[in-house]
Amino acid sequence: MTVISSLLAPEFHADGTHVIGLASPSRGAKDTSVWRVTLDPGSSSPTHELEREEVFVALSGTATATIDGREHRVSPGDALIVPRDTPFSIASSDDAAFEAVCCLPVGARAMVDGERFTPPWAQ
């Protein structure tokens, strides 16, 4: 068993997106990577795809997830399931930050602008 203190977990920040890496192989997880993401008001992730299904559990704020060209509203308490190999982005509302916990199988890679990589918070 391993406990990852949120105070010691690595943080990643880029363009209004803030990630706290919780569970990952480098922190003892063998099967599932988990992180907490916050999108500043009006911020959006780039459109990207993942090799495996990703699950978001919304904690606060609201967001619009665009999955394969269709928009979906995500509110606190909702679970957003993004299918593998499907283009998507997620954007917070303009009036408040959006916060969620995300889960992705260990080893799954993302693709942004044609480049495949393992997100640093999932390593």
Image (cartoon, helix red, strand yellow):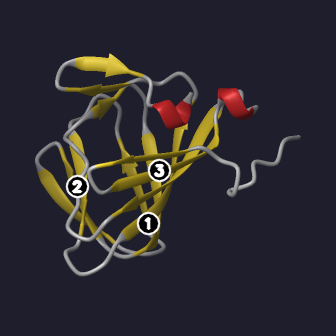
Q: Earlier in the sequence, mark 1 or mark 2?
A: 2
Q: Is residue 44 above or below residue 54?
A: below
Secondary element type, mark 3:
strand
Please tell me in which quadrant of the rendered image residue 26 appears.
top right
Q: Quadrant of the C terminus?
A: top right
The answer to the question of whether label 1 and label 2 lie on touching residues, with beta carbons closer than 8 A, is no
The residue where tag 1 is placed is: 99
Circle 3 packing at 10 Å, graded few (<14), some (14-19), many (20+), is many
Q: Is residue 20 left or right of residue 99?
A: right
Q: Earlier in the sequence, mark 3 or mark 1?
A: 3
What residue lies at 70% left-to-right and 50% top-to-bottom? Answer: 8
Q: Position of residue 102 (x, y in %)?
A: 50, 50
Q: Nearer the viewer, mark 3 or mark 1?
A: 3
What residue lies at 26% left-to-right and 50% top-to-bottom? Answer: 15
Circle 2 packing at 10 Å, graded few (<14), some (14-19), many (20+), is some
Q: Position of residue 44 (x, y in %)?
A: 22, 55
Q: Is residue 120 left or right of residue 23?
A: left
The CA span between labels 3 and 1 is: 10 Å
Please tell me in which quadrant of the rendered image residue 34 appears.
top right
Q: Earlier in the sequence, mark 2 or mark 3?
A: 3
The residue where tag 2 is placed is: 44
Residue furthest left in the image: 69
Query: What's under tag 3, amino acid-wise?
Result: Val
Query: What's under tag 2, amino acid-wise?
Result: Ser
**Of the numbered discs in the image, which one, if any, rests on residue 73?**
none
What residue lies at 52% left-to-right and 37% top-to-bottom? Answer: 121
Q: Is residue 35 above or below residue 48?
A: below
The residue where tag 3 is placed is: 19
